[in-house]
Every structure is written in structure tokens, then in C-alpha cells.
Amino acid sequence: MKKDIDWSSLTFSYQKTDKRYVANFTNGAWDEGGLIDDDMIVMSEDAGVLQYAQTVFEGLKAYTTKDGRIVTFRPDLNADRLIDSAKRLEIPPFPKDRFIESIRQVVAANADWVPPYGTGASLYLRPYIFGINPVIGVKPADDYQYRVFATPVGPYFKGGVKPIRVKISDFDRAAPRGTGNIKAGLNYAMSLHAIVTAHNEGFAENIYLDPATRTKIEETGGANILLVDQDGNLVVPKSDSILPSITRRSLVYVGEHYLGLKVTEREVLLSEIFEGKFKECGLCGTAAVISPVGSINDHGNEFAFASGMEEMGPVLTKLRATLTGIQEGTVEAPEGWIYEIC
């Protein structure tokens, strides 16, 4: 039986659910793992994660489809990305098949927390790995813990999808050949001051430029960027330090194979935006799917996209509607995209 929750009032915030999954890496191997009730973590004051930020994570959602099934969206890609992230931080990767099974167990055990179809809400899942044993010298931990918790979250947009104002950040998100292309906690920690600064100045987000030349746009603190040029083609900024967003990769496929769009992934100069080469812009990620951008401010010089500040542009609207339809079961999904839980 579903929990007695006002699903329409949920925000994107944490709420403890019934079960979570835990596995431990000790003596060079992962144990069998399993579901537990306790949401508290006990560790040494000198744990590797606390001293040297040795942690990686993922984010995905479970949905109730129109026909009443509970599903997740492309968890195999989350598993692959967590493995890549773990290797970069010298964390023992959690096996792909076990990752998918842990997601299945957590969603099934918390099925009563999965919001009903049509509410706009979903069950957010957070898998993560962290160094847990004492580490005082600068080196990788020996022991690790893998966990997955679930929390019901509301729709990212309350009251409809409205374009946002963003600014060009004075800070760099990632260094060349750094950790920008993995999902590590440290990447998000460095963005906190920048996002607080942006909010204090009246902007919703930062756009980070490439750190080498500061002439090319890369991504925001928590989302990849999509652009639509004047001919209606989809243009996706490309860089080795951009996180490989699963939502972005899915939208690129949808654009090409469902909507017949021409899609180009390439370096995008900031100057191209201010020259008016693009008529739509959006930020894409798990939480919002696509968040439309109405204007970009570069140190007082503001560029307003033709799509305006009232609603998402037509191309991005079709992209978002098609992908959410795939996730919710109203549009036929490509093979392997939807993983049915129950």
C-alpha cells in the first residue's frame, strides 16, 4: 500500500524510507551486501572520505508508468559511470551486475514510496562509495562502503517549466585532465561557493568556461548544456572535462531517432552565443530532464534567447516531452532503456 503522502507537495529533498542497501569492501573484496533498516553510518573520525574526499556517487530515479509498473531508466549506464568514477579515485569498483541488483532490491523494498503516475514525483536513488577506514597519510583507503538509499522527490519545476537566468562564472569547475568527467563529491564541493554567489546575485546557475582558454562553454555545476541553432539543429558542447550525462546522451538519441533532428557535438565558443547563433538553450540532468535558459549574463553583458523568459522553446519542449514519455511508459522506449522492477 502506498504511503500516506501528499505527493503533489513533495520537494527535491531527503526523506528517510524503509530500506537501504549496504555492501563493504574489506580484505580486498566486496562482501555479499544486503538491505538494512538503519540509515546511520558509523565510522572513524579519520575515515578516508572525511580526510581526503574519497567518494563517488550516482543519481537515478524510479517511476510508476501509466500502466502501473515500477521502472528505472538506464541503470546500466549509471553502473558504468560509477565504475569509471571509482577507478579515477582509486576506489574498488562495485560490479555492474551487483549495482543493478542493488537498485532493484532498494526500489522493490521501498515500492510503497514510489509516487503514483501523474503526480510528477518520483523515487530518487543515490548509490555511492566512500573510503571508510582511518587514513592519515595521503593515500587511498583500504576499506570502502557502497550504499544505496531512496527518497521520494517532487517535480523539479513547481508551477510549470519557466526559463532561468544564468551567469558566466569567474571560477573554474575542473582542470584540464582533472576530474571533471567523473561524478565525484569533490567536484560538487568546489561549486558550492560559486552557486551561492550566483544566487546572491539573482541568478539560478553558473555556466563554467573551459579553464585553459576561458572562451568555450562547458557545463553548469550540476547539469550539461544543450543548444538549438537558428536552423533548429541540436548542438551539444563537447569537452574532455564535461561529465558524461546519461540524460544528455539519451536526449541526443531521442533528438536524432525520434524527432529527426540533426545533432552536432562540438566545442562551442561563448562568443557564438552572444553573436546570436542559437535560439534555445537548456540545462539537462536527472532532476529536471531539461531546464530552459532564458538569458546568459557575462559580467553585465546579457544575452536573451529568442525563446524568451516565459516558456521553454519548441525544440527543447519536444525533446523533454518525448524523453519523459519514454520514462513514464507513454512513448515506446528503445530496447534496454527501461528496467522493470515490479
Image (cartoon, rainbow, N blue to C red):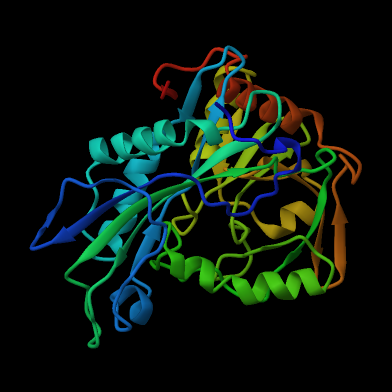
Q: Is residue 199 above or below residue 84?
A: below
x then y, percent, for residue 210:
56, 65
55 on left or right of 168: left
229 on left or right of 267: right
Outermost residue toward the left? 27
Quadrant where the C terminus sits is top left
Q: Is residue 291 above or below residue 189?
A: above
Q: Would you say residue 92 is visible in this rendering?
A: yes
Residue placed at 60% from the left, 52% from the top?
223
Q: Would you say residue 212 is visible in this rendering?
A: no
State the residue in front, 92 or 247.
92
x then y, percent, for residue 71:
48, 25
Total marks placed: 0
Q: Can you tell which quarter of the image residue 192 is in? A: bottom right
Residue placed at 32% from the left, 39% from the top?
102
Residue placed at 24% from the left, 63% from the top?
144
Residue placed at 48% from the left, 53% from the top?
243
Q: Can you tell which quarter of the image residue 335 is in? A: top left
State the residue in front, 236 or 66.
66
State the residue in front, 81 or 48.
48
x then y, percent, for residue 100:
32, 35
Q: Can you tell which quarter of the image residue 303 is in? A: bottom right
61 on left or right of 325: left
Quadrant where the N terminus sits is top right
Outermost residue toward the bottom? 137
State the residue in front, 168 or 80.
80
x then y, percent, for residue 150:
48, 45
